[in-house]
Image (spheres, coloured by chain):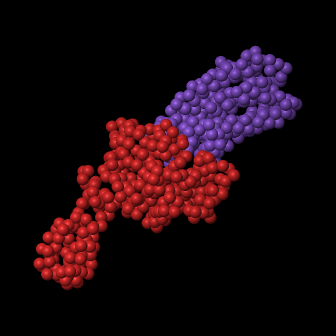
Chain colours: A red, B purple
Amino acid sequence: MNTVIEVNALERIFGANRAVDGMTFHVEQGEVFGLLGPNGAGKTTTVRLLNGILPPSGGSTRVFGLDPASDGQRVRQKTGVLTETPALYERLSAYENLAFFATLAGIPDSTLKSRVMEILAFFGLHDRAKDKVETYSKGMKQRLALARALIHKPPLLFLDEPTSGLDPEAAQQVNALIADLSHQNGQTILLATHNLLEAQRLCDRVAVMNKGRILAMGSLKDLARKLWPVTWVDIIFWQAPAESLTGSLKAHRGVKQVTGQGEAWQVQVEGEDVIPQVVQHLAAQGASILKVNPRAYTLEDIYFALQAGEK
Amino acid sequence: MNWRSIWAIAQKDLKEVRQNKAAWGPAIVVPLIFAILMPAIMIIVPQVIPVEDVERELGDIDVMLQNMPPALSAIFNGKSLEQMFIIYMTAFMLAPLFLIMPLMFSTVVGSDSFVGERERKTMEALLYAPTSDLELFLGKVLAAVIPAILLSWMSYLVYIVVVNIASYPLFGNIWFPLAPWWPMMFWLTPALAVLGISATVLISSRVKTFMEAYQMSASLVVLVLGLVIGQVTGVLFLGVGTVMLIGLFVWLVDAFLIYLSVSRFNRSALIAKL
């Protein structure tokens, strides 16, 4: 795998405010990487630093091997950015908006029109191509802004709060488009968001941020394992098993704790690999198991645990 | 330097300005007043009111016209009082007012381009485009300077036609423009258009709205009013030499302001103001 983004001890200071405070991470080609954090965590500043819009106060960054601070224009030729607000020219049509950015991106006149119409069709906006953007709904504007970010087929896409302010239906449409981009086109995506459900659905790895620092980084599974090294399993029986079974189960290798009573037990094990052995043991002892449910941690659980730890 | 990008930015800004009534409104109204209404009144009124009234009125300014600078006296040589009045008013008194136009047009478009873009929250997406800071700057400057110069030239053309047609019954020939108007059109007007935009760029870093920027930049018109007062009081006469000198001075100021603007126009400064 090729590393697309490399960030080492990155800092950006505005007066007394450390907007980005020693961030280190990397993003591999084809990966969807999430930057999660509350407002003011430093997500947007990071996107700006990685595109050479802001110079860093310290540390180093490489995007496709280029330094955005000194080679911003070349970096931006390879990136597309969906800004937090669509930032479209409302007095111009969708076609004019895209044609303008396509020209700036260096798409030649000979293919410009077909490229613009192709991407408008991809985002379902070709029927309204000549309408002024001010007549568009919020969802349509967001799709158009996404089309603008993709007009020059950038290998790296930055999405800053892509569903912010959208109704659930429009948000679902945009999320589906992002999922398509990563799965079908193999696009590398950096998603800056505070929408945890969105990040959980879309991201391969996430970095949880607060006050410009990364609190934890990894896949959902990695982060859950780091925070909660043991796994809880909920077991439901058809009939309540004998009390004595509790003792024999506690003695089983890998089982840390057994609680509950009657038909519902909670068993704490060292890892998920112990669960089949627990089930085998219970079945061998004559227990009639109805349901075995290892507790899965959501990104929300992880996020709030990390933010609470920070506080 | 990518001129295709620069031109695309300029064209986009002009398309946007065309949709902003507050921006193009003055671009239509002011030339109509300066190029058609005012000269028509100045020329036609002395021709249609009774001769004795004209002589009584013009007689009062006869002394003033006789005391004009030698260059102007030479132009007046052999002309009737009515002709002298028309020449004085159309070729000299109204001349500085025409210099308001390049300033006004470039500050209007410049304010919309530099501050309006920020006000409409479209600047951030533009900053992420693969252009250099200088290309962005030049695109926006051209969007303001080119129409300012072209609109001014169009106004001059209309003015020339109106003056010659309206005064033809009295003069019997095409006499306008006089020599000082040529450097005014092709030397001083472009210099003032550049002055307007370079001042607007500097002002744009200190204001938040299009109207604020426009109002502050429009205060440059005071400079031109100084020329009007100078002419009325006889302190200044806009002959060829004077226009060339004023133009040179404005170009030097332009160079300084452009240098300052370019050095302050960068992405990190622009994004900090969003």
Q: Quadrant of residue B106?
A: top right
Query: Residue B62: x, y in percent?
Result: 76, 21
Residue A160: in sight, yes or no? no
Q: Which residue occupies the extreme right position in the image?
A: B172
> In the depicted view, which residue is nearer to us: B153 or A260?
A260
Q: Is residue A288 left or right of residue A84?
A: left
Q: Residue at x 57, y 42 (%)?
A: B131
Q: Residue at x 23, y 77 (%)?
A: A280
User: Total of numbered circles in the picture?
Assistant: 0
> In the depicted view, which residue is nearer to us: B178 or A255?
A255
> In the depicted view, which residue is nearer to us: B37 or A273?
A273
Query: Residue B223: x, y in percent?
Result: 60, 27
Q: Residue at x 14, y 70 (%)?
A: A251
Query: Residue A154: x, y in percent?
Result: 54, 52
Q: Is residue A6 left or right of residue B157?
A: left
Residue A46: in sight, yes or no? yes
> In the depicted view, which residue is nearer to us: B31 or A55?
A55
Q: Is residue A114 above or below residue B160?
A: below
Q: Is residue A59 left or right of residue A305?
A: right
Q: Is residue A29 above or below residue A14?
A: below
Q: Residue at x 76, y 36 (%)?
A: B157
Query: Residue A258: x, y in percent?
Result: 16, 71
